[in-house]
Image: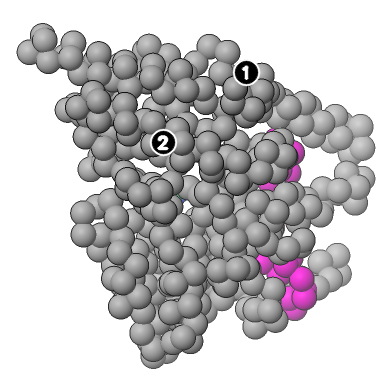
């Protein structure tokens, strides 16, 4: 008996849908609805007093629930609306007009990150994107080779969104530091399913969001910044919450506060922070080690089933490089994905990769068989009518 299946009852959608899409939108915990109600009740009953009764601190108190998942300390993670904003904050800490103006990004990085980086070119940044040899993997050596004395920031995805390929963040951060650069990792596709230890890996920054494996819903991104860097970093993308005395409402240039609030800007997305908490609490209660153990077992099983069905797998076979998703490459993958949806099996499709299938801690083994079985059946049905 799989002990993690007892969590299924906490997720209403699992009662009627085979939910293999937690790499895109994790299932909503039942308790999130109560949290949304708690927000509106607080707003209704406490009014403006809610700010001093918890709302003001929420970017940090909620961030603490992420900190324990990614290996950060209390007060070291702050909530932002999304990864794109977090990237803009981090990159606004640097001067891109000098000789050290290179930003090394990996070719599997999420496009939004690249868009923010290329926007820095007008400030003098040189964006160097390390190509993936096959669109799926990223040899660590290639990233290390691109990092040199002119590099200011190295940005990689811990787990690639397209192929679920896992990168060696410790090695990349080490190389960045050896040449005087800093390293940022996008944890969106790892936190909550693959163990993360930002402090052990010596990352300078880490960033992510809650929509996927953390089952926290939209509007709750997060940013970790290594504590000893705080005094040296002054984000140009800022706002009054980052001021040492926000309620002095002083004009002129900002005087940054000493704690992690210096990486905040304007009013936080309070309702999203209420609803996001339930997912983090469940992930913390189970523990990522147990989630990963089950994920490795179930992704291996999915690949086995795909092999038996003659379906091509576009995911790393070795566990060290495999995240929580298995990518299955079939003819007309987009149409097959749509048909699966009509049959109440939710997955998604990415061009140049295939159908992304993701078990999570709430997935039963029977659902793996059902998913691959239906993919095979749909492919055969389509071939028969050609
Ligand atoms: C690795 C990764 N980074 C970032 C994002 C999204 O970023 P944002 O929070 O800016 O929407 C995604 C998801 O869609 C992702 O998979």
Name the residue nearer the viewer: 310 or 208.
Answer: 310
Residue 259 in view: yes
Q: Is residue 260 magenta?
A: yes
In what element is the residue under mark 1?
helix
Q: Give the residue at x 69% y 73%.
A: 227
Q: Is residue 302 above or below residue 319?
A: above
Quarter of image, res 89: bottom right
Which residue of the protein is positioned furthest toward the front in this rendering? 1
- Picture coordinates of residue 101, whole percent (x, y): 40, 82
**Residue 358 falls within the magenta-colored stretch:** no
Q: Which residue is mark 2?
A: 299
Image quadrant holding the C terminus, namely top left
Q: Is residue 88 left or right of residue 41?
A: left
Please give the range of residues in magenta: 255-275
Bin the neighbour count of mark 2 within 10 Å (Cα to Cα): few under 14, some 14-19, many 20 and up.
many
Above or below, 136 relative to 116: above
Using the rendered view, name the quadrant where residue 155 is placed: bottom left
Q: Decide if residue 250 is in sight here.
A: no
When the figure is inspected, residue 178 is found, relative to residue 267, above or below; the finding is below
Measuring 41% from the left and 36% from the top, which residue is drawn there? 299
Q: Which residue is mark 1?
A: 12
Determine contact: label 2, label 1, CB under 8 Å: no
* Quadrant of the frame with the N terminus: top right
Q: Is residue 324 above or below residue 384?
A: below
Residue 204 numbered mark, or none: none
How dense is the environment of label 1, judged by Cα within 10 Å: few (below 14), some, or many (20 and up)? few
The residue located at (25%, 30%) in the rendering is 307
């Amino acid at each position: 008996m799989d002990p993690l299946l007892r969590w299924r009852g906490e997720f209403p959608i699992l009662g009627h849908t085979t939910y293999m899409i937690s790499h895109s939108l994790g299932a909503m915990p039942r308790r999130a609805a109560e949290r949304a109600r708690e927000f509106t009740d607080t707003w209704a009953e406490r009014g403006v007093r809610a700010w001093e009764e918890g709302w003001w601190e929420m970017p940090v108190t909620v961030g603490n629930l992420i900190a324990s998942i990614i290996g950060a300390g209390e007060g070291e993670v702050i909530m932002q609306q999304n990864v794109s904003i977090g990237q803009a904050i981090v990159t606004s800490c640097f001067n891109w007009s000098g000789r050290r103006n290179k930003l090394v990004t990996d070719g599997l990085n999420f496009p939004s990150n690249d868009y923010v980086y290329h926007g820095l070119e007008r400030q003098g940044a040189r964006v160097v994107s390390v190509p993936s040899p096959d669109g799926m993997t990223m040899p660590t050596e290639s990233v290390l080779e691109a990092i040199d004395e002119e590099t200011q920031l190295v940005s990689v995805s811990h787990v690639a969104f397209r192929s679920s390929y896992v990168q060696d963040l410790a090695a990349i951060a080490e190389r960045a530091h050896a040449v005087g650069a800093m390293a940022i990792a996008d944890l969106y596709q790892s936190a909550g399913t693959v163990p993360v230890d930002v402090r052990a890996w010596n990352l300078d920054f880490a960033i992510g969001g809650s929509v996927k494996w953390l089952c926290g819903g939209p509007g709750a991104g997060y940013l970790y910044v290594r504590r000893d860097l705080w005094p040296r970093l002054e984000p140009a993308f800022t706002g009054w919450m980052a001021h040492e005395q926000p309620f002095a409402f002083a004009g002129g240039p900002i005087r940054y506060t000493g704690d992690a609030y210096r990486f905040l800007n304007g009013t936080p997305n309070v309702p999203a922070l209420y609803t996001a908490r339930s997912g983090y609490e469940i992930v913390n209660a189970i523990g990522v080690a147990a989630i990963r153990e089950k994920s490795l077992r179930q992704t291996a099983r999915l690949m086995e089933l795909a092999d038996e069905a003659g379906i091509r797998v576009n995911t790393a076979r070795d566990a060290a490089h495999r995240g929580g998703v298995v990518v299955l490459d079939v003819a007309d993958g987009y149409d097959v994905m749509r048909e699966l949806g009509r049959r109440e099996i939710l997955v998604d499709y990415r061009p140049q990769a295939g159908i992304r299938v993701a078990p999570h801690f709430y997935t039963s083994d029977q659902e793996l068989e059902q998913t691959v079985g239906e993919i095979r059946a749909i492919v055969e049905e389509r071939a028969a009518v050609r």
